[in-house]
Amino acid sequence: MSESTSPTDDLGVLAERAKDGDRNAMDDLLRQVHPRVLRICRSVLPYSADAEDAAQEALLNIATKIGTYSGRSSFSTWVHSVAANSARSTYRKLKRTAQAAHNPETMEKPDPRTTSVIAGTRLDLLEALETLERDRPQMVTPLVLRDVYGLSYEEIAAEVGAPLGTVKSRIHDAREVVRPLLRPKD
């Protein structure tokens, strides 16, 4: 790379070569964008395995849809959009799968006064969960199972293998941490 060429310029050149069918350029391109794609997915999805799945989906989309890249924005901006869309898509799939696994007839109705807005459209909730996972990881699963998926405290206790009182305490404490992160920033 010459002194006058930036990494973004190199990505654009690689993208054009890959778009024209150069397989080596595609391999190099995917290898170079992989860390960025994974970082973007991790910023949306709190669990590493889910983020890695979303990153793989994003890389596949980049490879198969590079022909749709028009060059109106920088290639790195396009990559960011593809990665963020893959992460959100993965999250929605996970949410649908979890909801389908539970019979709505037997699920306890969550209390709307203490339940977060459903996370499918709440990226701020995902970011708050990421903060919670970093600081107090034992609280994430109970909070998500209660406030996002609507499981009863008893079901959560069985799922995480903790006493009922501990689960209630973790959910209460997690809400105290997450609530200020969800407040609108004026």
Image (tube, grey):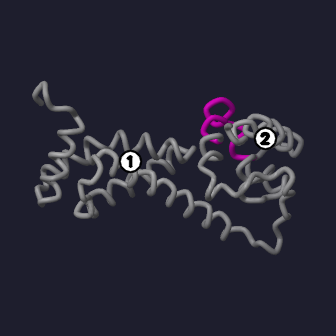
Q: Is residue 104 magenta?
A: no
Residue tagged by mark 2?
175
Residue type at mark 1? His
> CB of mark 2 within 8 Å of CB of mark 1?
no
What percent of the width, then of the height, locates residue 142? 75, 46
Going from N to C along the chain, the mark reached first, 2 or 1, is 1
At x 78%, y 41%, the residue is 175
Residue at image point 51% right, 41% down: 43
Mark 2, residues whose alpha carbon is within 10 Å: few (<14), some, or many (≥20)? many
At 72% from the left edge and 68% from the top edge, which residue is drawn? Answer: 102
Q: In the picture, which quadrant includes the C terminus?
A: top right
Q: Is residue 131 magenta?
A: yes
Secondary structure, mark 1, is helix
The residue indicated by pointer 1 is 80
Residue 88 versus residue 152: which sits nearer the camera?
88
Q: Is residue 67 left or right of residue 131?
A: left
Q: Which amino acid does the dot numbered 2 rest on?
A: Arg
Boundaries of the magenta span: 129-142
Q: Residue furthest right?
A: 165
Q: Between tags 2 and 1, which lies in front?
A: 1
Residue at the image position 44 percent from the left and 48 percent from the top: 52
Residue 182 in picture, x, y percent from top left: 70, 42
The quadrant in which residue 91 appears is bottom right
